[in-house]
Amino acid sequence: MAEPSYTSLPTSHLPGSVPAVITEERASAIRQDPEANMQIFPPNSGGGGGGGRGYQTLTSPSDGNGPPPGNNWNGAFSVSSYTQYFNVDTDDVVNRLTSSLYPTGDFFRKIEANPDLYGLIWISTTLVFVVASFGNCATYLMSKKTDSSISWSFDVSYFQVSAMAVYGYAFLVPLGFYLLLQYFGSKVGLIHFWCMWGYSLFIFIISSLLLVIPVDFLRWTITLITGVASAAFVGLNLKSHVELNDLTIVLVAACVLQFALAIFIKSWFFH
């Protein structure tokens, strides 16, 4: 008995079959204008990072009768959208940490091609825990130095205050200066501001470790040095990289805020 022969049957119109994803007309349109069907996230405004394209998706083509489709910001909630801002290795991070301790005004030049958010998040989080934990330790030492019989308990509210203060400062202050300088015509991107201000907080971690010493005069000396060093780092970098005619008020405001942060940490957590 002869075996039945099987022939190739077209299946594009059978029930349950899946049609081609891209028709010939759509493929032709994409070849002619590839950018018309691509969406870039985050928006590239000159400060988005080291040339990465970021989040991209294919969008449905317009039917030709209505306006073109608007931007889809769903990528803002995707972790993959921000991977380009964590593309740094140990050498990069150590180099930037070292640069923050020696304010020479060339930090923007070092991060220009590849600004990162790793330093901002890692340094801010570390500073929150260091300030809260060592602040409690410092108050314990001072209380025992004053009266060894006094009862003392760990103050959990230090973590709440330090988290609100540090995270609020690290994210909102650079955002405020970015918007202000954009109004005056600056071309520096927001990621660059976040990166620079994030690394400027590294010196506060070191000073918090030293503020445990139960000598109030020494604590104030460390606080003043920390405030001056961090203010100089921010001020010199803004002055060297932001191309505006008059930056006096902006520089003074940035330096005062850095110095005020140092005073706040000393007064609230290491009193």
Image: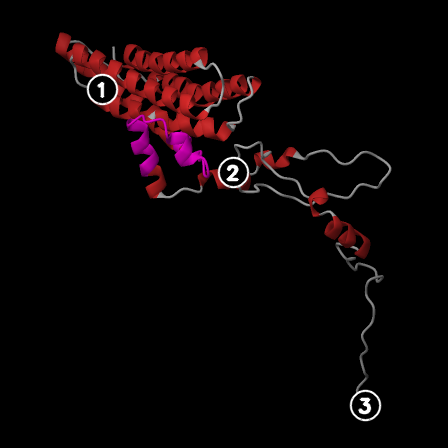
Which stretch is magenta? 94-120
Of badges 3 and 1, the one in the foreground is 1
Which is nearer the eye, 28 or 59?
28
The amino acid pointed to by label 3 is Ala
In the depicted structure, whether residue 29 falls above or below residue 200: below
Q: Which residue is mark 2?
A: 82
Q: Residues within 10 Å of mark 1 (few under 14, many from 20)?
A: many
Instruction: Look at 39% across and 13% down and name the residue there.
Output: 257
Is residue 191 or residue 271 the one in the foreground?
Answer: 191
Q: Name the disc covering residue 2, or none.
A: 3
Q: CA distance from mark 3 to mark 2?
A: 63 Å
Q: Which one is earlier in the sequence, the residue at label 2 or at label 1?
A: 2
Assign a secondary structure to mark 3: loop
Counting other residues with Cα less than 10 Å from the Cα at mark 3, is it few (<14), some (14-19), or many (20 or more)?
Answer: few
Mark 3 or 2, closer to the camera: 2
Identified at 67% across, 35% down, the residue is 72
**Residue 72 visible:** yes
Q: CA distance from mark 2 to mark 1?
A: 37 Å
Label 3 vs label 1: CA separation?
91 Å
Question: Is residue 110 within the magenta segment?
Answer: yes
Q: Element type at marker 2?
A: helix
Q: Which circle's residue, 3 or 2, is located before the other in the chain?
A: 3
N-terminal of the two: label 3 or label 1?
A: 3
Kindly identify the amino acid type of the residue bearing the numbered disc 1.
Cys
x and y, in percent, of residue 149 in the image: 13, 9
Residue 44: in magenta span = no
Residue 109 quadrant = top left
Question: Which residue matches tag 1?
Answer: 137
- Does residue 147 appear in the picture of this structure? no
Q: Tell me if label 3 and label 1 are in contact, CB under 8 Å.
A: no
